[in-house]
Amino acid sequence: MAKFKNPHPDNFKYSGKEDKFLEILCQLPEEWEIWHEPKLHGGLTPDFVIWLNDVEHPGIIIIELKNWLRKYVKSVTSDNIILSDHREEYNPIPKLKRVKENLNEALSKHYRMVPGLQDLAIVPILCFWDEHVHKMPELLQGDIEVNVFGKDIAKDHKKVEAYFSDIIKNYYAEVEVQAPVTSIDMKRTLRQYIDLSTRVSFAQGKISDPRTHKADDKHKKPIISTLDKYQERMVFKEQLGHQVLSGVSGTGKTIILLARANWFARQFPKERQLFIVNQMVLCNNLRQKYRIQYSNSQADTSKIQFKTFGKWFKSAYKGVGVVLNKAKDDQDAKVKLIDTLVEKALDNKLELAKNGKYGAIFIDEAHQMHTSWIKLLTKFAISFPTKQQKSTPNIWISYDNGQGIYRDRKFIGKEVGLDLRGRTHRLQRVYRCGMMPWIFAACCYPASLETYRDHSVSEYLEFVRKGAWPKAIIGDTLQEQASKLKELIKNFVNKENYKFSDVTIFYAVAGYNQDLPTKNQRVKSILDKAFDDVGGIEWVAINKERANWSSNRVRACSFTSSQGIDAPISVFFGAESFDIFNEDSWVKPGALFYTVLTRSTDVIIITYKELKNDPNSPFLSALFNGYIKAKEIKDKVEKLNYVYDEDGNSVYRVKWETFDSFINKS
């Protein structure tokens, strides 16, 4: 007998011939799991969800069961069914599509962490219990997305089993992907997003009518589960034009931009979009994240381009690439060249390539770009008329005024050429970094606290998680630190329900090139050797555009590419080795240090040889002084408990003046 997860069939409230369908389901393979009327992500409720826990071809079947006879169906549209007794019901075909889309959106947050989940077959099926499919109206015979079977199959459990198995097998053949290997993580994730909705004490045998939703609800699907109501209102606002988002590290600025890009793609499917990111590592990360999250939605991912400013600039203007290539690997020289060329472009002294304009432009990490760069980008955003009959470019900008790691780069909104009055949103709730890790980071770099407080309009800063204090690994050599780090991570994976892909190691290798080895190549060799027996390392900063963010390997990212990258466990590897930045005029060591410490959602691990206040090492000094301050306030912070805000979410809400007393007056 198949496993019924909720509730047992004895509690089902079906009547008449539909009861017999339960007998069919009971005879399916015992390893299959069946849910009755689970209320899935997005609120829709299919009749059944079946998890085919098959070794070779696993998959999910979503079922709508109908007891209609052809003679009772008076008329059919793409939305509604009119029955002979004048009852009106919804068309189950579009509902099944929405259910599949919502389930994909719920699972997408785990695609990176659960290998194979993005390839798992999810197949919606409409079943007519007492009628042949070919006798039903054409609009009820299924399409490329929804399969339909009738009474010739429905009343024979062997035929049903064969049909389900074949349809999952055919799915993998049609999309030309290899069926994933079913893992414990995959099962846990699937059960979480199917089981989470079962909030009824017994099944009612009724389905909520999607016709009660507004007509434009197809554009209002849940985007990311971590968005609160305030942020959702920003994403779904109908008004076009420009917006500016600011907030501390981890407040969801990038997620809001991705969600808004998806909203725009649904509303304006023919318009191109441009998503500008400061550096290539984050660009590749967001490109893969967007495609994974929205590949099964109405958004056409081919219409959105993810590029660094430099790559876009080369494609937008003729001759720019030739000039910039002369700078080769000299980052300072390349930035100065870009500045000069941008000024020429603003003065219309550069020839445009045939690149055209974009319906929407999104700029992330604007605080790491020159204001003139953003000013130039606004010229490529199509202007849309507003309610005031004025035209305004559709461009969204996010920045973090306290996090900039580069010298002489600062986003100045009033110089962009846009009227920002009433269009700047300051975000206060931190989703990524836990409260205790963030306080530790602020202890190491107190300037961040002062900057954030100056730009805050709220009395509080809020965290959705508490997090943990950093863990230290001490070793005389990098080899010893790497070995101890590997063992600690293995312990987390074995006991704390983490995966290797939850870990990102940040190391002090800037500009590493496989074809041009540097003295810092030893860091790569040391980490490769240490982690070889646990699957190796995904070198996301070395491979950049080729890095696979969905692999189940530990990530490794260079220090200067850390902005925008997040990980449940982040590692600050080899504190002493970061002294190579001491003589760099283009980077601010304190801000760089703070940036890495705020990448973690749960745990920070720091490795070093000796903790000391060394005037020749700003990194060690910041770590040393931060540790002393944090140690004094640790007990106070650990005693802070969460509160419930106005929308029912539990948050750790701390006043800015409390932070100030913690960090600057301890």
Image (cartoon, rainbow, N blue to C red):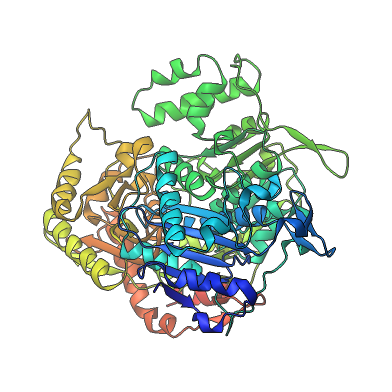
Q: Is residue 323 above or below residue 664?
A: above
Q: Is residue 15 left or right of residue 625?
A: right
- Residue 635 position by quadrant: bottom left
Can residue 464 be seen at all in this image of the molecule? no
Q: Please, which residue is most extreme toward the right here?
A: 388
Q: Can you give x and y, in whole percent of width and height, for residue 223 in the image?
A: 59, 56
Q: Is residue 392 left or right of residue 341?
A: right
Q: Can you give x and y, in whole percent of width and height, for residue 565 in the image?
A: 42, 51
Q: Is residue 87 left or right of residue 39?
A: right
Can residue 351 be seen at all in this image of the molecule? yes
The one of 345 and 136 positioned closer to us in this rendering? 136
The one of 293 and 625 positioned closer to us in this rendering? 293
Residue under the image location 62 percent in, 76 percent down: 14
The one of 244 and 190 positioned closer to us in this rendering? 190
Q: Can you give x and y, in whole percent of width and height, for residue 293 in the image?
A: 51, 50
Residue under the image location 57 percent in, 59 percent down: 151
Quadrant assignment for the N terminus: bottom left
Q: Is residue 561 above or below residue 162?
A: above
Q: Can you give x and y, in whole percent of width and height, for residue 334 in the image?
A: 42, 27
- Residue 629 position by quadrant: bottom left
The one of 41 and 433 positioned closer to us in this rendering? 41
Quadrant assignment for the C terminus: bottom left
Q: How many marks?
A: 0
